[in-house]
Image: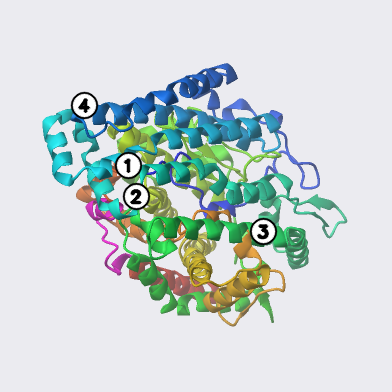
């Protein structure tokens, strides 16, 4: 069987979205405390009870799973005896996977409602433990299948037509045969899975539960308790002294965790390298990509292409410095809109209406299902104290998707809604068409649906801009989106390559090493006009995605893919739209590179990446022209 990804997000947690403006300024003044969950109307909360109506139902499934895990033991040592034996084992394994998915997702959705609640911390711990136990119970399946020769396996598939649903999985397993260990060794690795998640869990508890960003004082003498939402709102504001104060306060708040963050990230790298070596891969990159049959050249070519075309990004930074009128541009100046006074706010209801209008080219069925998600308890809308940060989409095979937002009435929140609903509909359609074994999306394809939504919506909004200022605001946002989702993710990928290669070559890591490496790469990407403050090089240790090795590059490839797909849809290419809808209903029943080829994009070619870089340069030129017109 493929290695389980119980916590696989349907479109996973986007770094760009983790940095969106969140908060509830329309309900609470900045100087007041963060809203509690009880302050939010039910219509703006997700319905986790659609998975389990209450904890008793969760406990019932937990008990059932506990009691039925031993049933797998009856198959151990017997899978090669008959096709029926193999089929029954795989079917039982899938049925237990469905249950653990519900247990796990429910527990962690409830925890993300308020990470301070110990009962859901414990529930999540129990779900993680029984997931590890299930993995241990299933660990014999892969090795036993791999002990069979291909001719016998082919004979099983021919003899029992019901096994056909597993044919791609079995073929893919044979492809990875050299990296699957013995039954005993796989059992050990499965039992260690809970331990291997410890670095990520420690970081998450620091980031979401223990870490406080600090308090600052505005020009009126009012105290502001910083949250992520308020912090990013300040960074987008025109008060430069407040931006500097907020930046310095937040960076200083991380210093108390500096050595812990370094040790935790270092431990995660050690974990990555341990699994790569144990499974006989040449590198962590090869190990991370092999499950999806992605050649490492895709990552290296992506980084190389961007390194060869940094001039448009440097031009943007120079333009920003010039238009803001600063002698020195700091990192806390990067998010200030060029025309903040022209930015409009959107209520959540207005955002829904705008998104639905913008996505009309996606077709009638798509819009109908989109509206269903908006009104059926899929979305948790507003920031509250202790709530998980950023935005994501999650769910299970038997549930509808779930979307976490932290909506704050800004343009980016409107696009976040479109983005996460792209993930949700991708999962919704795939769950309907694919059998359980193939229902997930790979991380490599996950960002395509969400970013296609954003691209189509942006083209609509640009085409319907009422005046020059509105167009400048939209171009500014579009450019920042590409910078965040494409260039920044490639920059992060280059950092990941550097720190993994350091471990692989026998080198040591430390807080200073992480900081110096991150600073050097960031300076290269942003050019000489940006000054990186003394403590603004800690970001490499504060990004949760680095605990899921070689994940962030998929935002960049997904973004480039979406730009090509969206253009076909907007041109009225019916075949292109049909190919996209087919993509939306496809999980893992084919290799992700092949799935994208079916959708019209071949990432073995540089075309999609080069198109995105060219688009970015064109947008920067257009923005410069509008800004300098006077």
The disc at residue 180 is 2
Q: How many marks?
A: 4
Side of 546 relative to 282 (left or right): right
Give me the C-alpha separation between circle 3 and circle 4: 50 Å
Give me the C-alpha separation between circle 1 and circle 4: 17 Å
Whichever of callouts 2 and 4 sits on the residue coming sooner in the sequence is 4
Q: Position of residue 507 (x, y in %)?
A: 56, 72
Q: Which residue is mark 4?
A: 84
Q: Do the CB atoms of the residues marked 2 and 1 lie less than 8 Å apart?
A: yes
Secondary structure state at the residue bearing disc 3? helix
Label 3 neighbour load within 10 Å: few <14, some 14-19, many 20+: many
**Quarter occupied by residue 372:** top left
Whichever of callouts 1 and 4 sits on the residue coming sooner in the sequence is 4
The residue at 85%/52% (across/down) is 222
Label 4 neighbour load within 10 Å: few <14, some 14-19, many 20+: some
Side of 4 relative to 205 (left or right): left
Q: Position of residue 121 (x, y in %)?
A: 65, 34
Q: Which residue is mark 3?
A: 261
Q: Quadrant of the N terminus?
A: top left
Up the image or down, 504 lies above or below 211; here it is: below
Whichever of callouts 3 and 4 sits on the residue coming sooner in the sequence is 4
Up the image or down, 549 lies above or below 33; here it is: below
Secondary structure state at the residue bearing disc 4? helix
Give me the C-alpha separation between circle 2 and circle 1: 7 Å
Label 2 neighbour load within 10 Å: few <14, some 14-19, many 20+: some
Q: Is residue 82 magenta?
A: no
Side of 612 relative to 315 (left or right): left
Range shown magenta: 592-608
Q: Which residue is mark 1?
A: 142
């Amino acid at each position: 069987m493929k290695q389980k990804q119980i916590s696989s997000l349907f479109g996973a947690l986007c770094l760009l979205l983790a940095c969106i403006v969140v908060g509830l300024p329309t309900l609470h003044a900045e100087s007041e405390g963060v809203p509690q969950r009880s302050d939010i109307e039910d219509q703006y909360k997700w319905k986790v009870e659609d998975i389990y109506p209450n904890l008793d139902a969760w406990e019932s499934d937990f008990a059932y799973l506990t009691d039925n895990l031993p049933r797998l033991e009856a198959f151990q040592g017997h899978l090669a005896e008959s096709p029926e034996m193999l089929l029954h084992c795989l079917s039982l394994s899938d049925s237990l996977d469905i249950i653990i998915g519900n247990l796990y997702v429910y527990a962690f959705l409830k925890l993300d409602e308020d990470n301070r609640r110990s009962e859901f911390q414990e529930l999540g711990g129990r779900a993680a433990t029984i997931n590890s136990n299930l993995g241990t119970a299933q660990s014999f399946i892969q090795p036993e299948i791999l002990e069979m020769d291909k001719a016998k396996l082919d004979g099983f598939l021919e003899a029992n037509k019901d096994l056909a649903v597993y044919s791609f999985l079995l073929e893919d397993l044979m492809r990875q045969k050299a990296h699957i260990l013995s039954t005993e060794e796989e059992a050990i690795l499965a039992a260690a899975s809970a331990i291997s998640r410890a670095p990520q869990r420690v970081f998450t508890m620091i980031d979401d539960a223990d870490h406080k960003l600090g308090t600052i004082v505005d020009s009126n003498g009012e105290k502001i308790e910083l949250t992520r939402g308020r912090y990013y709102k300040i960074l987008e504001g025109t008060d430069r002294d407040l931006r500097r104060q907020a930046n310095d306060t937040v960076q200083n708040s991380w210093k108390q965790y500096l050595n812990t963050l370094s040790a935790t990230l270092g431990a995660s790298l050690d974990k990555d390298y341990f699994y790569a070596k144990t499974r006989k891969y040449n590198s962590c990159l090869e190990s991370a990509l092999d499950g999806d049959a992605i050649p490492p050249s895709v990552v290296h070519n992506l980084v190389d292409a961007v390194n060869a075309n940094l001039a448009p990004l440097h031009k943007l930074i120079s333009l920003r410095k010039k238009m803001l009128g600063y002698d020195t541009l700091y990192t806390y100046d990067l998010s200030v809109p060029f025309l903040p006074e022209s930015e409009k706010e959107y209520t959540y209801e207005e955002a829904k209406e705008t998104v639905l209008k913008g996505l009309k080219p996606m077709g009638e069925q798509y819009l109908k299902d989109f509206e269903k998600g908006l009104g059926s308890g899929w979305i948790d809308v507003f920031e509250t104290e202790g709530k998980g940060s950023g935005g994501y989409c999650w769910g299970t095979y038997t549930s509808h998707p779930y979307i976490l937002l932290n909506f704050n009435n800004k343009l980016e929140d409107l696009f976040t809604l479109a983005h996460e609903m792209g993930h949700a509909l991708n999962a919704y359609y795939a769950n309907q068409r694919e059998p359980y074994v193939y229902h997930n999306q790979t991380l490599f394809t996950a960002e395509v649906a969400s970013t296609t939504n954003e691209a189509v919506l942006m083209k609509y909004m640009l085409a319907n801009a009422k005046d020059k200022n509105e167009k400048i605001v939209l171009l500014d946002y579009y450019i920042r989106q590409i910078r965040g989702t494409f260039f920044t993710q490639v920059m992060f990928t280059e950092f990941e390559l550097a720190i993994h290669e350091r471990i692989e070559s026998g080198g040591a890591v430390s807080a200073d090493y992480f900081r110096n490496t991150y600073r050097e790469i960031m300076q290269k990407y942003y050019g000489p006009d940006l000054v990186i403050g003394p403590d603004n090089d800690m970001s490499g240790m504060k990004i949760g995605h680095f605990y899921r090795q070689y994940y962030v590059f998929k935002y960049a490839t997904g973004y480039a893919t979406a730009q090509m797909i969206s253009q076909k849809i907007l041109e009225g290419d019916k075949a292109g739209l049909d190919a996209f809808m087919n993509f939306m209903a496809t999980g893992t029943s084919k290799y992700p590179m092949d799935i994208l080829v079916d959708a019209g994009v071949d990432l073995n070619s540089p075309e999609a990446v080069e198109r995105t870089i060219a688009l970015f340069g064109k947008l920067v030129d257009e923005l410069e022209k509008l800004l300098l017109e006077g």
